[in-house]
Image (cartoon, grey):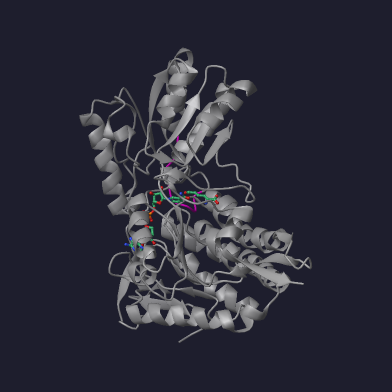
Amino acid sequence: MATTNSQATDDDAVMSDVKNFIDGQYRESAGARTFDNINPCTGAVIGRVHEASQEDVDAAVQAARAALRGPWGSLSEAQRGEMLHAVAQGIERRFDEFLAAECADTGKPRSMASQIDIPRGAANFRVFADAVKNISTEAFRTATPDGKGAFNVAVRKPKGVIAVISPWNLPLLLMTWKVGPALACGNTVVVKPSEETPTTTSLLGEVMNEVGVPPGVFNVVNGFGPKSAGEFLTEHPGVDAITFTGETRTGEIITQAAAKGLRDVSMECGGKNPALVFADCDMDKAIEGTLRSAFANCGQVCLGTERVFVQRPVFDEFVARLAREAGRFRLGVPEDGSTDMGPLVSHEHQRKVLSYYQLAVEEGAEVILGGGVPEMPAELAGGAWIQPTIWTGLTDDARVVNEEIFGPCCHIRPFDTEDEAVALANATPYGLAAAIWTENVSRALRVAPQVDSGICWVNSWFLRDLRTPFGGTRQSGIGREGGQHSLEFYSELQNICIKI
Ligand code: NAD
Ligand code: 6OD
């Protein structure tokens, strides 16, 4: 057992050796199983990951349970808050390591990870460490028959051991988005990061140790979903609540697991998000915003736009400009400062996205841009590269305009009236995010509440304030996180009634 993740050498190449982090110690898998960590830019093996067995998951849950009763449980909110501020500083101190690990696992441009992923990893601890100090609970003075009365005071307590199941698209950001508030509320956590991108979650264990977070408060088990660490953890009776980010289908399976023992769930799932571009928009802003919302992170953002509806008078101009700008994207490796877009996360995901590119053609799309695999230099030929792609001309019932693809692509369709735009936006079983582009404030105020989504941006996209409610309607999820909503999910209210 070790307190740091070590490096394994293989044929003289230095590779990362990503272990489970249990009770403050890095541990190899009790089942001695490992799997490869692949760099999506090249297809090369860059490390090995120790796959947690049932025994490892049991040990992690047990450590988390014991830590609830240990020194962690006796800290005040302010003391926990100080420690979480120290965790944020620890991430910043080791910024370059987190950045390199995140880029190696995902292939995303450094420019993006250094401005969004890693800073948000730190901010997710700071914001909730402070928020927990500022949330009040209710109190009531109650009449009683003897005339003396009673006081009712609600107190907030940790929920217990929280299982955090996180995806691969924004690994550190989305994992800490849950771990930050969970720890701020006094819980302990067992995290199962995505098998595709385990490194930054594992590295966070070192920071926890460096700043003195007690052993067992933060645990990491690596592995896959079904019949692996994900299932072992979500089925574990020692887990009190489950917070999940990932595909809707996985969310359904985990919700069923959580039903055993009536454990609470927070589900942040998929989307098929619309953008509504009105003729009265600022076209430069709408183009710039849609370029980001459709193609940032190679289209692998749950909030991303895959359905664009453009009012007919500006439809041709919008399509031409978006295609011209997206056609200029430079695909490349994270370290190259001129890279606009990296690869998809894996060959498996590339196969899925390419199957939709093929389907779009079969369903009768006009391919305005892309539609296949780009030519890359020989040293990148093994990577999961994909072209940014734009379609028009599909019917409203086409699978490509109804199913989440999670790639750098969008379908653009014209509309005439506001009512038609709202109906089109809502014609989906999902309800995560939407963007409206208009310079008419009255229109924005009229349309936004009619769109069935957890978040609706007007003249912006992915503009985040961590105090605001975040989550989706319908198949995009259950519950809200962010600000006091996170604190509500990660804590239990107890009413104490005191008879005078
Ligand atoms: P995924 O559902 O395949 O995997 C997410 C996590 O769940 C991984 O850690 C995986 O190992 C684990 N998992 C899979 N099957 C499991 C099982 N049976 N039991 C327990 N754990 C299991 O999702 P992904 O491919 O990693 O991420 C992409 C998806 O996530 C997209 O659908 C995207 O829209 C969604 N997403 C949603 C949000 C949001 O905030 N709503 C944010 C990011 C991503
Ligand atoms: O910004 C966030 O807090 C958040 N949960 C973003 C989700 C992005 C989805 O890919």
How far from the left and from the top, in percent, is residue 418?
49, 19
Q: Which residue is located at x 40 percent, y 69 percent? A: 261
Q: Which residue is located at x 34 percent, y 72 percent? A: 232
The verdict on residue 335 being magenta is: yes
Q: Is 310 drawn above or below residue 435 in the view shown?
A: above
Which sits in the foreground, 329 or 358? Answer: 358
Q: Is 406 drawn above or below residue 459 in the view shown?
A: below
**Within the image, what quadrant is residue 85 found in?**
bottom right
The verdict on residue 354 being magenta is: no
Q: Which residue is located at x 28 percent, y 37 percent? A: 357
Q: Which residue is located at x 53 percent, y 47 percent? A: 337
How far from the left and from the top, in percent, is residue 26?
46, 81
Residue 26 visible to an observer of this rendering: yes
Q: Is 493 drawn above or below residue 277 in the view shown?
A: below
**Which residue in the rendered view is the most extreme toward the bottom?**
1
Which sits in the foreground, 372 or 141? Answer: 141
How far from the left and from the top, in percent, is residue 28?
38, 81
Q: Which stretch appears magenta?
A: 328-336
**Which residue in the rendered view is the most extreme toward the left?**
362
**Within the image, what quadrant is residue 96 found in?**
bottom right
Q: Is 320 drawn above or below residue 3 in the view shown?
A: above
**Which residue in the rendered view is the most extreme toward the top?**
313
Image quadrant where one finds the N terminus: bottom left
How far from the left and from the top, in percent, is residue 383?
33, 52
Image quadrant where one finds the C terminus: bottom right
Q: Is residue 137 left or right of residue 398?
A: right
Q: Main secondary structure of the magenta part?
A: loop
